[in-house]
Amino acid sequence: MALTVATNTGALMAQAAASSVNKELEISMERLSTGKRINSAADDAAGVAIASRLTSEIKGTNQAIRNAMDAQALIDTAEGAHVEISNLLQRMREIAVQSANDTNDANDRAALGDEMTALTAEIDRIANVTSWAGKPLLDGPASSANAASTEQTGNASFSFHIGAGNSAADEIAVNIAATGSSALGIAGSAAKPQSLTETADTGGAFAVDQSAGTITVGEVADTDVLKVKINGTEVTTTVAFAGDAYEDTVTGVAAQMKANIEAAGIAGLKISQSAGILTLTVGGAIDISDADLAQAAIGTIDAAMTKINNQRADLGAVSNRLDSTVANMTNASNNLQAGRGRIEDADFAAETTNLAKAQILQQASTAMLAQANAAKQNVLSLLQG
C-alpha cells in the first residue's frame, strides 16, 4: 500500500462515519424530546397521511360525544318539565273527581274551578318558559319568534349530530310536542265577550252576557256596523244583505259576525249560533261547574295525560339511545387514538437504545478520525536526514 499524504483515506472514512452517526444521534434526540416517531413527512410519508386522517376522525368523534351529551341534557330538560306538567294534570283530575260528587254546591265547584284555572295557567307558563340555551322546548315550532304568551300547537324539531362524518347515520331527529293547554285539549275558561256596539239602532235587541259567553244580535239594517270586543280583541262586522240571502236578518247577521270573529284568529274559540245568539267557548275547555261536566273533564284530562306520557316515553327512549351512542363513540375514540399512537408515537425503549449506540459510535468515529490524522505523521520520518 502506498504511503501518501495528499489523500488520507482513513480520515475520510472516519469523517463519513462521524457524519452519519451525528444524523442518527439527532433523529434519536428529536424523537425522545417530542415523544413522536414522526416529526416530519421525511420520517414516514405514508404514516403522516394516515395519522392526519385519524386525528380528524378522533377530533370529530370527541366533538360528537359532546354533542350527544348536550342533546341528552336538552331532552332531559324537556322531560323534567313533562314530569311537572304530569303532576299538575294529576291534581286537575283529582279536582274533577271531587267536583263530580254532588256533595258540592255551586260555591264549592266555583272554588274548585278557580284552582283548575290556576293549574291550567301554570301548565301554559311551564310550556312557554322551558328552554335550553334560549331554545324553547315545549311550545311548538317557530316559537322563538312569538311572544312568550303565544302558545304553539305543533312540534319543535331538533336534529342532533352524533357522528364524526356527514352522513344521515350521523344525525338523530327528535320532535317534542307542544304541551300547552290548547295542545293538550284542556284550554281554560270560556271566552269573554266584553261589549257590543252598533252605528245605528233600528230597534233591535243587542246584548252581551259575559258570564254565559253569549252575544245576542237584534234586528239591523244593511250597512250597519257592529263592533264586538272579545278578550280585548275588537272585531268589526259590516252588515251586508245580498238579495234574499239574509231574509232572516237576526240569524244572517249572527252568521256574518261568527265568520269575522273566527277570521280574527281569537285563539281556540268555538262559536255556535242560533236565532241570533252567538255562544262563545274555548275548544277543549275544562268545565267542572256541575257533576256531568266534571265527569266529562275527567276524560279530557285523561287524554291529556296520555299525550304527556307518550311524549315522555319517546324522549326517554332517545335519552337511553344516546347513552349507548356516547359509550360506543368513547370506545371508538379510544381505539382510534391507540391506532394513531402506534403509527406516530416514539418507542422510548428503542430510541434510548439507538441514542446510546449513536453516542458510542460518535465517540469511536471521533477517536478514529484523530488516529487517522496522526498516522500521517509517520511520513515526516522519511524526510528527516
Image (cartoon, helix red, strand yellow):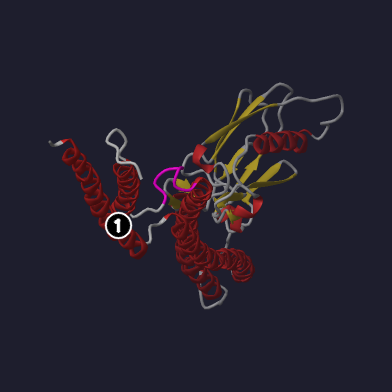
Q: Residue most toward the right? A: 244
Residue 159 location in percent, x, y?
A: 58, 50
Q: Residue 121 vs residue 18: left or right?
A: right
Q: Position of residue 173 (x, y in %)?
A: 61, 53
Please give the name of the residue rendered at 59% of the width and 53% of the height, measured from the top-left corner.
182
Residues rendered magenta in the picture: 38-44
What residue sits 58% from the left and 41% below the top?
208
Quadrant location of residue 298?
bottom right
> Looking at the image, which residue sits at the far left?
385
Does residue 109 lie above or below 222 as drawn? below
| Near-viewer residue (204 or 150) | 150
- Estimate how packed mark 1 is, as few (under 14), some (14 to 19) or many (20 or more) residues with alpha carbons within 10 Å: some
Q: Identify whether 366 is placed above or below 203.
A: below
168 and 17: which one is in front?
17
- Magenta stretch, main secondary structure class: loop
Disc 1: which residue: 355
Frontmost residue, 10 versus 313: 10
Q: Where residue 263 appears, x then y in whole percent?
A: 67, 35
Q: Which structural element holds mark 1?
A: helix
Nearer to the camera, 270 or 355: 355
Name which residue type carries label 1. Answer: Leu
Quadrant for the C terminus, please.
Answer: top left
Could you tell me which residue is drawn at 22 percent across and 51 percent down? Answer: 367
